[in-house]
Amino acid sequence: QVQLVESGGGLVQAGGSLRLSCAASGRTFSTYAMGWFRQAPGKEREFVATTTRSGSNPTYADSVKGRFTISRDNAKNTVYLQMNNLKPEDMAVYYCAALVAGRWAYWGQGTQVTVSS
């Protein structure tokens, strides 16, 4: 079992920055990859970024590449999403998820990111 709790969302002006955090508990954190996803109103949940168990080889959606950075601190059981140069189209509820047994098996409750233009 893995429990995930996101934090760090909020209201920011376009061009601004936010850093999301996702604190994990339960299963040993370094044994599973982590990802960030988002869901905007009226849209399906979409992939944002992933990081491997060690934090190497991050992957990003094309829409956030060069602006967002995913990282993790295995000593703190936490994964981060640094979001820079935010755009109105980045506005969504952001979720972290844990990749266990080949699927995104565990999800946090989400944190709202609002970007004003």
Image (cartoon, helix red, strand yellow):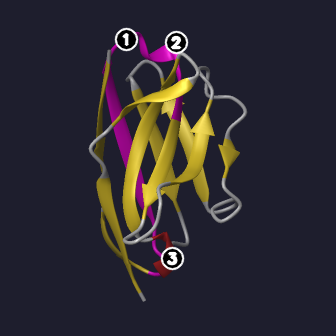
Vertical placement of residue 105 versus 20, above or below? above
Give the mark nearer the N terminus: 3 vs 1.
Answer: 1
Q: Judge whether 107 appears above or below 24 on screen.
A: below
Q: Which mark sits nearer the N-terminus, 3 or 2?
A: 2
Residue 107's tag is: none
Check disc 3 and give the amino acid type.
Glu
In the picture of the structure, the residue carrying the numbered disc 1 is 27
| CB contact under 8 Å: marks 2 and 1 | yes
Q: Measured along the vertical axis of the image, is residue 35 above or below residue 48?
A: above
Residue matched to label 2: 31
Range drawn in magenta: 14-34
Residue that appears at 61% across and 20% down:
54
User: Which secondary structure lies at badge 2?
Assistant: helix
Q: Which mark is residue 89?
A: 3
Is residue 37 visible in the rendered structure shown here?
yes
- Spatial CA span between label 2 and label 1: 8 Å
